[in-house]
Amino acid sequence: MEDNFLGQILINNHFATKEEVEEAINLQKRSSEHLFLGEILMEQGIITQRTLDTVLSVQRRRLQMTGKTTVGLSREVIKERMKAEDIWEYANLALEMEASDIYIMTDQKPSIRLHGSLIELERPEFSAAQIASMIEKLLGPEDMKKFREERDMEITRNLKEKARFRANFFYDSHGPGIVIRIFPGIIRDLGELGFPLIVKDFALLNQGFILVTGPISSGKSTVLNALVDEINKRQNGHIITIEDPVEVVFEPKNCVITQREVKRHTESFAVALRSALREDPDFIVVSELRDLETILTAIQAAETGHLVLGTLHTANSVRTIHRIIDAFPAVHQPQIRSMLSGTLRSVISLQLVPNIDGRSRSLATEILLVTPAVSNMIREDRAYQIPQIMQTTSSLGMRLMDDSLAHLVKKGLVSYEEALLRAEDKAKITRIELENK
């Protein structure tokens, strides 16, 4: 268990690849000596002693905090409600506990993810027949037959007032399983999330390309929805969203809003985006830029006078720019750099970092504003110099991720080890620790 947790932290923070960790685990199993996973990875030169010490410290803290994390409901209430063996009941339960996900697997006890930690619930293990029965109650006989044939299925449903949930059904080596993702339906204000006024004023733009980036479950959808709501309040036009799935249902305020869900209302992001250009939009929101065609169409839409907002699974501004450009063949990259330099307005990068108390997480952010100097660097293939400009023009509202992490450490919200694990410039975080000694 602890070695698996260590491996996951290393993979999630890009210290080792999934393949490297799996190979080290295989070596560990074959070895006659009792070697720890970290020792094997050090021997192979994949991680250093310093990296191992930092990750082990974070691992210990997370394991301790997981045990202390409270779920907001008494054990007796949870036990009683989990007797229902009903997906709706479990989704409602997760919503009330403020959990982001609930896991129901064959031959395992159910678990929830709360503040980033995985917590096992006190209930007997589910059998394959119990899980199949729960899925069939929700899907009905025809869809259940399709699920058994295709072995994978995903649905979204409304939950209580504005909340929604997505249920993913699948089979693994033990039998059927369910993972439910909860979307509370709450639209947060950008100021409440800690963004400066200049980010709220992005809602006044009429043309360009804004990207919200970060790893899975880092708050991208929350920030994107906050931006859309700000546009809805402060502009007058047609907003088209293309989502997978629709997480929040927006109520029209000053804008007309069209919300389309991939696989339910349209074939794919690329198809919906091409269609959107013929539907007289002013603002286009793409919940995920997954492929080359979608990225190119989004940039072209921004070029032709629309404000386009989208997300990418990238860690910071420079990596985001490289990710977009590198998605294209080398022969087209100069043209894409030119197009991107003229359309990109901002990159907002996010990380949700576990707090020291183990009961919540803090949002660390990086904000790139594309000034003429930044635009020139993108066009001239000098994106690696952008952090220097961000550092020297922080008065404009720019912020590096490392500075945000350092701020959280200084406030006593986030541990030194958690910040060090995520920092690009490790020395910046180390200096804070040395100052505190």
Image: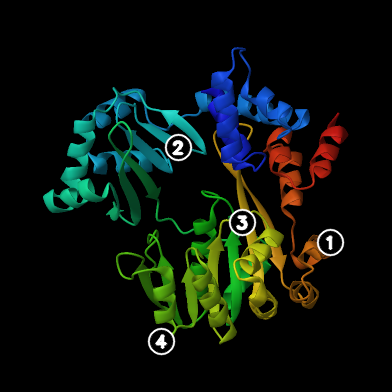
Residue under label 2, please give it: 113
Between disc 4 and disc 1, whose residue precedes?
4
Give the alpha-carbon distance from disc 2 to disc 4, as whole Å: 41 Å
Picture quadrant of residue 436: top right
Give the alpha-carbon distance from disc 1 to disc 3, as whole Å: 19 Å
- Please, what secondary structure does the residue beneath circle 4 have? loop
Residue type marked 1: Gln
Give the alpha-carbon distance from disc 2 to disc 3, as whole Å: 22 Å
Q: Is residue 202 above or below residue 22?
A: below
For the residues bearing labels 2 and 3, Cβ distance under 8 angstroms: no
Q: Position of residue 296 (x, y in %)?
A: 55, 75
Q: Is residue 216 above or below residue 225?
A: above
Q: Residues within 10 Å of mark 2 (few under 14, many from 20)?
A: some
Between disc 3 and disc 4, whose residue precedes?
4
Residue 278 disc label: 4
Residue type marked 4: Arg
Looking at the image, which residue is at 84% across and 61% down?
388
Q: Residues within 10 Å of mark 3 (few under 14, many from 20)?
A: some
Residue 163 disc label: none
Residue 388 disc label: 1
